[in-house]
Amino acid sequence: MKQITKDRELLRRVITLSIPAVLAQVSSIIMQYIDAAMVGSLGAKATAAIGLVSSTTWLFGGLCAAAAAGFSVQVAQLMGAGEEGNARKVLRQALLCTFLFGLGLMTLGIGISRPLPLWLRGEAEVAKNSTRYFFIYACALPAIQLRHTAGNMLQCSGDMRTPSQLNILMCFLDILFNSLLIFPTRSLCLMGFSLPIPGAGLGVAGAALGTALAELVTALLMLYAVCFRSSSLRLSASGSWRPEGRCLKTALRLSLPMALEHTILCGAQIAGTRIVAPLGTVSVAANSLGVTAESLCYMPGYGIGAAATTLVGQSIGAGEEKLARDYARLSVLLGMGIMTCTGGLMFLGAPFMFSLLTPDPAIRALGTRILRIEAFAEPMFAASIVAAGALRGAGDTLVPGILNLASMWGVRITLSLYLAPRLGLTGVWLAMCIELCVRGILFLARLLRGRWLTERLV
């Protein structure tokens, strides 16, 4: 009875920390739905232009997240050990180093923006818009990096609410900016009155610019929150910004395996894009919208994973290994339960979801088919997402990267290459479903063996 009461209390804390992060993730996905619907109204070619480079944008975004996590996990463990002063030192170094890293990514992204659609075997009719979209995205990478860094710092200090609220605000800003930049000036009839709505009519480029502006505003607000408003991390004018070797080495030890992991995952997604691209514009568009539609199902897992990183990291920092293990297991069970339910809803609601994203009947039919395949993988996908968050809190990032390497390239890409010529896009998503189940089993095995509990960074 005492153990049950304890588990209930731990689960309550997991849920309490997860809810703001889940809401932020869901709002972000709703933003992507609205973005996709706005661009989808311009036609299949516009949707395909963004879909062609979407895997590459995920790669760059994942590298930003990896750089931020290398410092934020240290903050989580320092907060658990009661060392707020040292946590603020890490924050200063994180802001400086990750901003410089973001500038480097921006330079690289701008450099590859022109040849990228050709590398991905995109059709000539969509390549021009793809280049424009990715160029604007690359220019926003320093802001994206700082948003990740500041938001992660707030979360790992125990403040899940502020970054969640700001991420929700970013969604509304993105919708506002997109509506002004994608479409030309038009009139809205309301109660017999005609109201002019200004618009720049930039199309696909307007979608990228709207998102970039939303990222910039949110990054500035996130920096203000962590540097001046956070009760535990706010900075004073007297602190030093000089990088320290130990902090940087620890950040690299954490970030490099995560960067490898994201590169493996997104590299496989890019390879998957090359497999899908020859299947035609309808398949490219359906694949892109299918990923957007599925994300509403799995984003709760990422919210719970963020809470698991904080709880496990603080427990490890406080020397409470058993508590860290309990938080990890309860978080995984919660994530699997929620994503089983959302997977069922996705299976039933797939036709409706695609009706919101595109008016094209061919894309709707193909998208509904692939989305229903993916619904069966959601429970094990949840296991891999949340377990990865828990392992990250303990500083265990190398082995998860290796597991992703084996799963993505050994299962997904191999099966996709075999099934795509025979089953088309359906075969690619069948391969994805099988791979996610394998990945979940691998991460559960790693979590249950418990070797990650011996990690301590500070």
Image (cartoon, grey):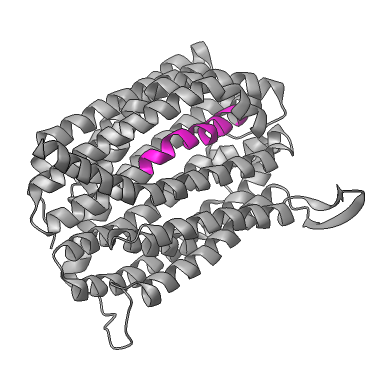
| Residue 147 percent across, percent down from the top left | 44, 62
Instruction: Using the image, determine if residue 282 lies above or below residue 73.
Output: above
x, y percentage for residue 326? 15, 41
The majority secondary structure of the magenta stretch comes to helix
- Position of residue 352 relative to residue 308, above or below, is above
Q: Is residue 108 visible?
A: no
Q: Does the magenta stretch include residue 9?
A: no
Left or right, 49 with respect to 249, comes to right
Numbered disc total: 0
User: Residue 76: x, y in percent?
Assistant: 23, 60
Q: Residue 390: horizontal and vertical position, in percent?
A: 23, 45
Residue drawn where x is 40% and y is 40% of the image: 300
Q: Single out the residue that lies furthest toward the front.
A: 1
- Residue drawn at point x = 21 percent, y = 40 percent: 8
Farthest-out residue, top? 422
Q: Tell me where residue 255 sits by quadrant.
A: bottom left
Relative to residue 118, is residue 183 depicted above or below? below
| Magenta-drawn segment | 285-302
Q: The N terminus is located in which quarter?
A: top left
Residue drawn at x 30%, y 43% is 261
* Residue 200 in the figure: left or right of residue 324: right
Horizontal relation, residue 352 to residue 81: left or right: right
| Along the viewing direction, whichever of 413 and 404 lies nearer the viewer | 404
Report the residue at 20% width, 67% height from top.
Answer: 247
The answer to if 292 sits in the magenta stretch is yes
